[in-house]
């Protein structure tokens, strides 16, 4: 049962992302990306991480993508940009990467070492919060300082003379 | 957290609170009082760190006041205080208003104070990225000059790629060792391959931060575009912070033989190409950028030895390089008025028309060239001494030869300052703050050059 759901989600995820990078209009690309984020969130849920699934929906699909939509609407882009067709030489790096990925997959499949997936452990919110704010509390503080100064910098640089 | 633990982390608290205070009260205060607050906070953090005994245990999870922090926090604070003093007059001349500038400098200092205190890789990475983040903003601070914004964008794009590399490297090391804690992150033999891969990617990311060849291309453009005081801070503290990160990691992991070849290649390419490219520059800021590429090559050479002597030489050189480059960029910034004074020909006869600022620039150049009795000689001496002692003779010879060749372009600036007289009017005098900063930097160069004993002792304690 879980395997079937996983494969359906994986198909949605791949198709959604593929459509997102090939769409010519930015708004469509974003909607496709949101779809693939939802599939990814469900996948996290299947892996036993409901909290991360919720974050994925709230933060990525919800906040960040909606922000992108707002920005694009504010910019009022009329027609999609005409991009030049990629030349043959532009394909080489991508092909090299594909070869690497396929090669790595082949090595894994041929090595006959079947890794047993670890047991399904549910992580309660309390434990998650404890780890995040106690063990890595300093990291949260540093990140919040960094975000504050990102805001300050953006406001300063965006100021009109 | 008890009171003693809070005492250990006081430098971080002071700088963080000062950054927020400047941001909050900025609109109500004069720019001179903002500078004063920033300088006071930096000095307080530095003095506190210098006179607090290092604690061996973690204060709060992820942070500990290590012996390395006891050396580096005063060094970073010195650089930040001098930068604020230098930029006070500079920003007034350039009409750069606002509390954002001192607040961001203090934020950079805050992140720099966190970095040597980190006891796990996550904090280490976040601290390094916060330092870079502050510099993305600082580099593009000058809204009146298009080059400043351009430099900021270039630095941001390059820095983002470098950050991705660094994060990937940390992630691979974490995969191999199974823990983020530095003290427990010993390479397990069965995961050797994945940890080596992590180190390889990490070294690439750090090559961007240290601007080692072939990841150095951003350096000249960013130094040229950035306001001069920012270039002073960027070329010193951010480089020392990146070197400190490598030192912390190398100190916790057993020496890895597979790192030798990539580090040696980075080091030799940086030393040779950096010095050769600097020979051809006519813009003094670009020349200093290529010279910093070469100097980071010397640092990589000392890192390569993997010995205690080598690591001591890295810290010593970091401190000395901070003093030298603060003096060099400080002199340039105090000589810049409506426009940046950056072409080599603009400096003709400056040594006669403004003896103090010209003298500081000449002293910085002589020290960068490594001529005794300046601090630059002591630094280079220990780097090459540790390399020869560590058995990497061919690289040390290449380094010594390229350092000898570099004397040409440093002394060309000195010749430009003193060999010709000029008809151009003398530059206007500058305020007390900039004078103080220039005096402090040149005093540091001379004192370390003549009497390096105390600094050597501090470096020895830091590595214990």
Image: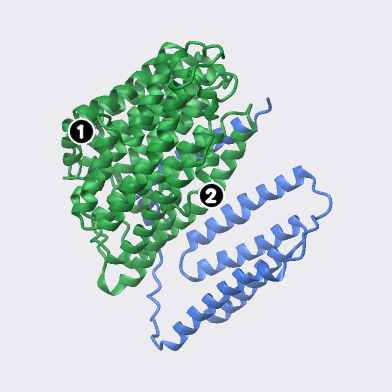
Chain colours: A blue, B green
Query: How far apart, in angstroms, are the residues tagged by discs 2 and 1?
Result: 35 Å
The residue indicated by pointer 1 is: B455
Label 2 is found on which chain of the structure?
B
Q: Secondary structure at mark 1?
A: helix
- Who's the residue at 21% across and 47% down the image? B385
Q: Name the foreground residue: B416 vs B1.
A: B416
Give the image location of residue B122, x and y in percent: 37, 52
| Image depth: mark 2 or mark 1 in front | 1
Instruction: Please say whether residue A66 is visible from this viewpoint.
Output: yes
The percent coordinates of residue B445 (x first, y second) are 29, 27
Marking on residue A92: none
Query: Is B446 situated left or right of B79 in this image?
Result: left
Residue at image location 38% in from the left, 30% down from the top? B365
Q: Quadrant of the C terminus of chain B?
A: top left
* Residue B91 sits above or below residue A149 on the image: above
Which residue does the numbered mark 2 point to in the structure image? Answer: B158
Q: Chain of mark 1?
A: B
Left or right relative to A75: residue B77:
left
């Amino acid at each position: 049962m879980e395997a079937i759901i996983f494969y359906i989600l994986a198909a949605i995820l791949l198709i959604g992302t593929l459509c997102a990078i090939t769409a010519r209009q930015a708004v469509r690309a974003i909607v496709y990306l949101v779809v693939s984020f939802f599939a990814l969130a469900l996948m996290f849920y299947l892996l036993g991480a409901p909290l991360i699934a919720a974050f994925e929906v709230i933060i990525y699909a919800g906040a960040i993508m909606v922000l992108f939509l707002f920005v694009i609407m504010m910019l009022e882009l009329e027609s999609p940009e005409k991009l030049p067709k990629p030349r043959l030489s532009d394909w080489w790096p991508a092909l090299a990467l594909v070869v690497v990925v396929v090669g790595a997959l082949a090595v894994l499949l041929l090595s006959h070492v079947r890794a047993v997936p670890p047991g399904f452990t549910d992580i309660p919110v309390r434990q998650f919060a404890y780890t995040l704010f106690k063990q890595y509390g300093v990291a949260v503080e540093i990140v919040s300082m960094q975000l504050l100064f990102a805001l300050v910098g953006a406001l300063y640089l965006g100021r009109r003379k | 957290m008890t009171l003693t633990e809070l005492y250990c982390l006081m430098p971080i608290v002071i700088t963080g609170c000062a950054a927020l205070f400047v941001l909050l009260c900025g609109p109500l205060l004069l720019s001179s009082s903002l500078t004063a607050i920033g300088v006071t906070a930096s000095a307080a953090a530095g003095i506190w760190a210098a006179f607090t005994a290092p604690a061996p245990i973690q204060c709060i999870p992820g942070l500990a006041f290590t012996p390395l922090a006891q050396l580096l926090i005063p060094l970073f604070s010195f650089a930040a205080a001098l930068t604020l003093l230098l930029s006070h007059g500079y920003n007034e001349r350039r009409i750069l208003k606002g509390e954002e500038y001192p607040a961001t400098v203090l934020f950079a200092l805050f992140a720099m104070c966190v970095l040597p205190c980190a006891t796990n890789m996550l904090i280490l990475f976040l601290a390094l990225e916060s330092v870079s983040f502050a510099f993305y903003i600082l580099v593009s601070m000058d809204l009146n000059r298009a080059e400043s914004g351009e430099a900021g964008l270039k630095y941001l794009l390059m820095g983002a790629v470098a950050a991705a590399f660094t994060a990937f490297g940390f992630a691979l090391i974490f995969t191999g060792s199974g823990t983020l804690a530095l003290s427990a992150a010993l390479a397990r033999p069965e995961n050797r391959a994945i940890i080596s891969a992590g180190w390889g990617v990490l070294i690439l990311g750090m090559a961007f931060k240290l601007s080692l060849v072939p990841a150095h291309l951003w350096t000249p453009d960013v130094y040229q575009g950035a306001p001069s005081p920012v270039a002073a801070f960027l070329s010193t503290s951010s480089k020392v912070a990146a070197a400190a990160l490598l030192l912390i990691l190398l100190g916790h992991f057993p020496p890895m033989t597979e790192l030798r070849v990539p580090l040696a290649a980075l080091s030799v390419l940086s030393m040779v190409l950096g010095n050769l490219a600097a020979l051809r520059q006519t813009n003094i800021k670009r020349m200093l950028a290529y010279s910093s590429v070469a100097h980071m090559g010397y640092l990589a050479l000392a890192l390569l030895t993997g010995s205690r002597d080598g690591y001591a030489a890295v810290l010593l050189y970091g401190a000395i390089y901070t003093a030298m480059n603060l003096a060099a960029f400080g002199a340039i910034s105090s000589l810049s008025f409506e426009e940046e004074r950056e072409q080599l020909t603009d400096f003709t006869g400056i040594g006669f028309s403004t003896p103090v600022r010209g003298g500081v620039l000449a002293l910085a150049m002589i020290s960068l060239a490594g001529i005794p009795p300046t601090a630059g000689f002591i630094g280079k001496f220990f780097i090459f001494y540790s390399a020869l002692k560590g058995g990497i003779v061919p690289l040390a010879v290449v380094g010594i030869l390229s350092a000898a060749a570099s004397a040409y372009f440093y002394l060309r600036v000195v010749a430009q300052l003193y060999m010709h007289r000029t008809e151009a009017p003398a530059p206007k005098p500058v305020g007390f703050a900039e004078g103080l900063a220039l005096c402090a930097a040149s005093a540091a160069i001379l004192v370390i050059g003549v009497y390096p004993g105390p600094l050597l002792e501090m470096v020895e304690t830091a590595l214990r």
